[in-house]
Image: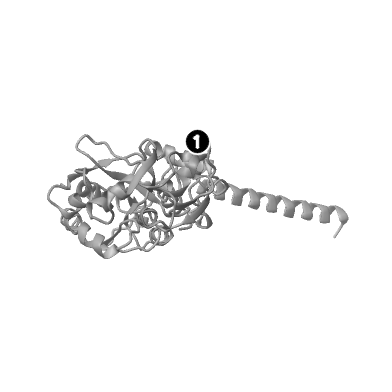
Amino acid sequence: MSSLRQLFVRFRASTLLITALALLFTTASAQGCERGQLDAMFCDTDGDLVADAPTDPAQWVNPDTLVFAYTPVEDPAIYEDIWDPFLEHLAEVTGKNVRFFAVQSNSAQVEAMRSGRLHLAGFSTGPTPFAVNLAGAVPFAIMGNDEGNFGYTLQLYVRADSDIQEITDLKGKVVAHTSPTSNSGHQAPEALFPGLGVVPGEDYEIRFSGSHDNSLLGVVAGDYDAAPVASEVVERMAARGLYDPNEVRIIYETNRFPTTSYNYVYNLHPDLVEKIKEAFFTFDFAGTALGEEFEGVSKFVPINYQDDWSVIREIQAFNGVEYTPAGLTD
């Protein structure tokens, strides 16, 4: 073969390789999508920060049994009974069997939805963005009152007989935080307290208690000097007589944050999603165990993750939170 012919063959081979690579790149780009901070398995073409439903109907999930989980609590068995009236209503409206799934941690709850074992869930305030970005959770409802208002505050508690009078008095003390992903129990204090004169972990020792219940009861018992906790949890504990409110006092309180979000997984059949929303928004709390447990709440109200969780995302961004499995720790 002449040198000219060899050059032509090499040129043609190179051209074919470049064409193939260009075709491969074009195909890959066509299959790509906008997703923001969402995991690579999801798309967000409309920019609302939550996963889009699959465009292929073959990928829609329509299970015979809907699996529901409430945020991790100290005694899941009690909460399973409390949720019974709602789950019966959900089954009636959707025509599906419904099963309550008790979870032991935020990470286990997110992983259950990500793996397809969980269809509906109430995620705590802080873990909600992890569920959205890692598991395809779509927040759509929250507990509210007759006026449609919702939310809770971060309350910083000390014992009633403590010499701690203001937040700067926490210097040199032992303070209970709940868990790294908790909003009011850790991330909000990390973001807000430095501006008030105290840097958590530097000016005072942080000890993770595992839950808001443990934090407050630890203050009552004298195990901790103080604890930031969610007001809604404290209110439920007081209603159940788990502590004497006269034994503690509040030295600091924030504006209101959103409470537990209620979510469906992004790939549920659209018709089923509409039935699920109908079940939530037609449920009457009055006279039910759920209504008794969540005092002051009368109904589920619609939410918009992009707007209603903006302050939470800002707090997490301040703390350098990354929505990765490694970042989701309890």
Measuring from the top left, give residue 33's x and y in whole percent: 50, 45
Kindly tell me whether residue 47 is visible in this rendering. Answer: no
Q: Which quarter of the image is occupied by the N terminus?
A: bottom right
From the viewer's side, name the closer residue of 285 and 216. Answer: 216
Measuring from the top left, give residue 43's x and y in whole percent: 45, 47
Relative to 69, 330 lies left or right: right
- Residue sitting at x 26%, y 36%: 149
- Residue sitting at x 22%, y 51%: 239
Q: Secondary structure at mark 1?
A: helix
From the viewer's side, name the closer residue of 158 and 27. Answer: 158
- Judged from this view, the residue extending furthest toward the left is 287
From the viewer's side, name the closer residue of 220 and 283. Answer: 220
Res 256 → quadrant = top left
Q: Which quarter of the image is occupied by the C terminus?
A: bottom left
Reading the image, the residue beneath label 1 is 196
Kindly tell me whether residue 294 is visible in this rendering. Answer: yes
Q: Amino acid at mark 1?
A: Leu
Measuring from the top left, give residue 197's x and y in whole percent: 53, 37
Q: Is residue 251 above or below residue 234?
A: above
- Residue sitting at x 73%, y 55%: 13
Measuring from the top left, give residue 98's x and y in whole percent: 23, 61
